[in-house]
């Protein structure tokens, strides 16, 4: 019985308990030591690291975009300024469910599929974490209120003010000024690393026109600031700031009053007007009509608005007619005349008998004069160079061009900017075509034919020029051979701008400086030679210009031209049963400068007018040039013209022996 019931060994149990207690206490001590060491590590050893990370949760470095430089016209009128708007922006990292947030916002404000698509594109090119990305530009007061009331549901969504580009003239100067719009991935990738940094926080870049040409001047330098944000991404405090440097303000030679006058003078016609100040090369007006509203592009044009612009294949409002080429027609005749005088293929006394057509030796085909398209017909009769210009006699220039040959024509006319872009800061302007043997072989794979020269001698065939080129060329005639390259920029922050490559093109030198007077006199007769008893011996533009203003205070030197759009037979043109579409009518052109033949006041303005499908250069384009010239001389410059002194005619040159070789 004693063996069945054993007594407990309390001493052994106590020893086991004490050992377990000691081990537990040791473990607790070691854990406590580890905790102390961890705290020391966090609070002492890694204090700076975790302090910086803590600040990073509430302190953010962000870009401060610079204010874009303003653009003024020559009289100080604003052409491009900056206006404040309020945008809806999103910090992607602070939004838990982006799709849900976007859907919620659709119920509060107008948010189109275009807005969402453009927002996602901005997200893809966003380079800075926690940077706000615009979702919707230009919120209304009602929309701002809706966002504010529901702000507690919109973590990471905020309303931010921004200055954006605004163009007060709207479509009036859209092509020449250009516009800014959102920078795309291709443009961003093309920037250097420094430039990419400078475009931080900036969503816009110059796309076309002056905005693009002088982007470096207008953009400025980005700034930086340190801000404290709450857990919803809202800025609570501004802690540090490096101010941005605003872009430079620029002044153009462009005259807004003249720009308006040119636009108004074009009326309902599609076309272009370019006006240049010959002494400085300053582009006073550069209008392409119809235009478009550049303000639509600043904050992102909608698909609907863009489709309207690109699908209008008749008016093509995005197409810049002032810097794109067309056949110059008879406007090239004064330059061909100068070439003939300079190279001694004609002189002041040389004349032809014009039967109304021209034939190459051994060729039966007849190149007709424009008189064959009229009821009069029969040619211009006895015609010298001066009459060939003021009456626009095609046959005279067929003969002259054939005898000079394309090599002489191409070499001489290249001095006036044909086939080149002389403009210093209109780099996007096309060069047109000044054809040559080499050009045709390379572009067409064909040799040059004598008939090609005949067509080129009246500005048709392969010869193409832009209104800007025509204005630059006639400006050289106004300057009597001095070449002053066209330019838009006049001043930078009020300081005159002198380009480094100014006057890099050599002047046009003639064998006899009197040739300039002779051609100027001939061009003045285009406008001012009145009707007489002699058969068809008046200026082609007299009836449309000088006869309409008997009290013209100045003389204008001009030349009209027509450029055929498509080949239409003479039978169709003369038929009363067939209506030729307006889109197939000839283009009308006119070049001029004024005042002409004035010994006291040098030419102040050179103008080129292009009227798409205007049909007649003298009756349609000529009055437009006159209206623009009137506005500038009489209303803007307010010149008080004294009695003009016509330059004396020089006729004592000896008769030159005229070469008889034809063009191969």
Image (cartoon, helix red, strand yellow):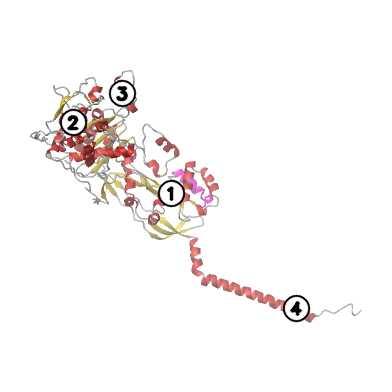
1 vs 4, front mark: 1
Furthest residue toward left = 652
Residue at the image point whose x is 69% and y is 78% from the top = 22
Tell me which label, 4 or 2, sits earlier in the chain.
Answer: 4
Furthest residue toward right = 1
Magenta span: 140-155
Is 314 positioned to the left or the right of 497 in the image?
right
Q: Which residue is mark 4?
A: 16
Mark 1–mark 3 Cα distance, whole angstroms, equals 51 Å
Query: In what element is the residue under mark 4?
Result: helix
Instruction: Tell me the crowding category of disc 2: few under 14, some 14 to 19, or many 20 or more residues within 10 angstroms, Cα based.
Output: many
Tell me which label, 2 or 3, sits earlier in the chain.
Answer: 2
Is 85 positioned to the left or the right of 109 in the image?
left
Q: x, y percentage for residue 74?
A: 25, 44
Against 139, residue 236 (above or below) is below
Mark 2–mark 3 Cα distance, whole angstroms, equals 26 Å
The quadrant the C terminus occupies is top left
Q: x, y percentage for residue 595?
A: 17, 37
Provide the major secondary structure of the magenta segment: helix
Image marks 4 and 2: residues in contact by CB distance under 8 Å: no
Tell me which label, 1 or 4, sits earlier in the chain.
Answer: 4
Query: In what element is the residue under mark 1?
Result: helix
């Amino acid at each position: 019985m004693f063996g069945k019931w054993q007594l407990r060994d309390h001493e052994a149990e106590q020893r086991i308990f004490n050992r377990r207690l000691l081990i537990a206490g040791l473990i607790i001590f070691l854990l406590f030591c580890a905790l102390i060491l961890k705290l020391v590590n966090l609070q002492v050893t890694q204090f700076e690291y975790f302090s910086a990370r803590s600040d990073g949760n509430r302190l953010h470095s962000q870009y401060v975009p610079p204010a874009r430089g303003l653009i003024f016209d020559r009289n100080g009128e604003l052409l491009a300024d900056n206006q404040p708007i309020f945008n809806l922006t999103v910090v992607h990292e602070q939004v838990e469910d982006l799709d849900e947030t976007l859907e919620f916002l659709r119920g509060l404000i107008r948010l189109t599929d275009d807005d969402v698509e453009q927002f996602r594109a901005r997200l893809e090119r966003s380079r800075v974490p926690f940077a706000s990305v615009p979702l919707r530009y230009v919120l209304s007061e009602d929309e701002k209120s809706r966002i504010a009331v529901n702000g507690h549901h919109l973590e990471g969504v905020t309303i931010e003010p921004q200055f954006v580009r605004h163009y007060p003239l709207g479509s009036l100067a859209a092509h020449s000024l250009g516009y800014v719009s959102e920078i795309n991935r291709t443009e961003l990738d093309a920037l250097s690393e420094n430039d990419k940094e400078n475009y931080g926080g900036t969503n816009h870049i110059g796309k076309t026109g002056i905005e693009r040409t002088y982007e470096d001047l207008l953009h400025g330098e980005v700034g930086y600031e340190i801000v404290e944000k709450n857990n919803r991404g809202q800025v609570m405090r501004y802690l540090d700031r490096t101010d941005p440097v605003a872009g430079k303000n620029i002044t153009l030679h462009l005259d807004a009053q003249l720009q308006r006058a040119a636009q108004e003078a074009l009326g309902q016609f599609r076309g272009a007007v370019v006006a240049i100040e010959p002494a400085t090369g300053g582009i006073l007006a550069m209008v392409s009509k119809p235009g478009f509203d550049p303000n639509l592009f600043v904050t992102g044009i909608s698909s609907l608005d863009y489709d309207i612009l690109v699908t209008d294949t008749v008016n093509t409002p995005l197409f810049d007619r002032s810097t794109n080429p067309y056949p110059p027609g008879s406007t090239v005749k004064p330059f061909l005349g100068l070439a003939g005088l300079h190279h001694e293929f004609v002189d002041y006394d040389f004349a032809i008998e014009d039967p109304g057509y021209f034939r190459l030796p051994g060729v039966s085909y007849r190149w007709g004069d424009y008189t064959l398209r009229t009821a009069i017909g029969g040619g211009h009769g006895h015609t010298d160079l001066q009459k060939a210009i003021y009456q626009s006699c095609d046959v005279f220039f067929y003969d002259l061009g054939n005898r000079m040959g394309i090599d002489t024509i191409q070499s001489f006319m290249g001095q006036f900017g044909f086939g080149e872009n002389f403009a210093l800061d209109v780099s996007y302007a096309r060069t047109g075509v000044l054809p040559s043997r080499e050009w045709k072989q390379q572009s067409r794979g064909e040799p040059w034919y004598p008939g090609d020269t005949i067509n080129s001698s009246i500005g048709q065939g392969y010869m193409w020029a832009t209104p800007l080129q025509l204005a630059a060329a006639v400006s050289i005639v106004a300057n009597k051979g001095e070449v002053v390259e066209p330019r838009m920029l006049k001043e930078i922050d009020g300081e005159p701008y002198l380009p480094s490559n100014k006057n890099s093109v050599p002047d046009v030198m003639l064998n006899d400086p009197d040739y300039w007077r002779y051609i100027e006199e001939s061009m003045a007769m285009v406008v001012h030679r009145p009707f007489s008893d002699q058969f068809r011996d008046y200026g082609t533009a007299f009836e449309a210009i000088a006869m309409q203003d008997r009290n013209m205070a100045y003389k204008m030197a001009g030349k009209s031209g027509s450029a055929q759009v498509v080949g239409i037979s003479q039978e169709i043109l003369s038929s009363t049963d067939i209506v030729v579409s307006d889109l197939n009518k000839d283009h009308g052109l006119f070049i001029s400068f004024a005042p002409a033949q004035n010994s006291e006041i040098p030419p102040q303005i050179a103008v080129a007018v292009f009227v798409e499908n205007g049909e007649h250069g003298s009756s349609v384009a000529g009055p437009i040039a006159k209206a623009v010239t009137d506005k500038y001389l009489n209303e803007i410059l307010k010149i008080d013209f004294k009695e003009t002194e016509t330059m004396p005619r020089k006729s004592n040159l000896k008769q030159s022996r005229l070469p008889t070789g034809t063009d191969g």
